[in-house]
Amino acid sequence: MHEQTVREMMSREARKTNGASVGIPARLMDFPLPEGRPRFPFFGGNALASSLFAVFSAIFPPGERFFVESVRRFRDTITDETLKAQISGFIGQEAIHGREHEHLNTWLAAQGYDIALADRHIRFSLGLLERLPPSQQLACTAFMEHFTAHLAEQWLTHAEFRTSTDAEVLKLWSWHAIEELEHKSVAFDVHARVSPAAYRERVLAGPLVLGALLPGIAFSWGAILVKQGEALSLREHRRGLKALLGKNGFVTRVLAHVPDWFARDFHPDQQQTDAVEREWRERLFGAQGELNAHFRNREAVLKAAA
Ligand SMILES: [Fe+2]
Ligand SMILES: [Fe+2]
């Protein structure tokens, strides 16, 4: 997303009741390219895990545009002032996530990750979802937000992930994670209000998203490894697979929560993250916040939240 587009979106959002007043502030971050960092920044230099996280990073810019559009389409039908403010916060946060991941993707591409190939596959997959009726697209967004919120919780709490990932690269993921937790209910709540067949669309969203996206993700992941010359690093792959899909693996912990989505009384707030959010908001953006040097609108956010 172009810088100017982000700025226009930000100022439009700032004019409305902004998300900061409802706990969803659009923090305007500006992370530098991670110069001089290891080519495989995740899980102690593991190529398999780093390639999967590179695919995730490739997904975010087009994915978050899809999320924003699917919610924005219904914004004018929402009359609840709090939910309207949450939508503003959601749109602002996702727009900036997309921009910062584009920036990171430039660096990843320079490290030999074929981000362009992953981007093509993801756009094709999202194009399939864009053929669905608008409220079904919104249900798909809510499902992807559920998945992302559990990824986000792991980004902040998975001990091995945090201790074995390059500290500079980790900054962007920590900021993204906390904001995913802050806005995790918004798409779901909008969908619940606007869809006359909310549960049916919700149940359909799971297989639709997985069917549309998983093949492209798997292919891109494999292709990136091959292009990195790492396809046959079997011992490293065993280590990566254990870190991702082992008993307490990063992805295992996320997948464990996919079935929650299909419960009739499911709500994203059932994922209890208040304590994690409080802890990390203070660590990242408090008086001595680790990320304050990159937080361009900190004063405005504090003022709006007061
Ligand atoms: Fe995001
Ligand atoms: Fe999100």
Image (tube, rainbow, N blue to C red):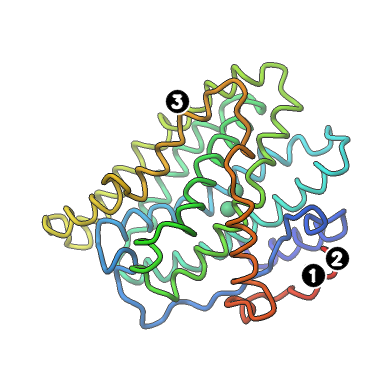
Mark nearer the N terminus (1 vs 3): 3
Disc 2 crowd rating (10 Å Cα; few below 14, some 14-19, many 20+) is few
Q: Residue at x 16, y 53 (%)?
A: 238
Of all residues, the one furthest to the front in this rendering is 275
- In the rendered image, which residue does mark 3 sit on? 207
In three-dimensional space, the C-alpha distance between marks 1 and 2, rounded to whole angstroms, equals: 6 Å
Residue 143 locus on image (x, y percent): 55, 34
Q: Is residue 129 above or below residue 91?
A: above
Q: State the SS at label 3.
A: helix
Labels 1, 3: front one: 1
Residue 100 locus on image (x, y percent): 55, 65
Q: Is residue 294 left or right of residue 226?
A: right
Q: What's under tag 1, amino acid-wise?
A: Leu
Q: What's under tag 2, amino acid-wise?
A: Ala
Q: What's under tag 3, amino acid-wise?
A: Pro
Q: Is residue 72 above or below residue 23?
A: above
- In the rendered image, which residue does mark 2 sit on? 306
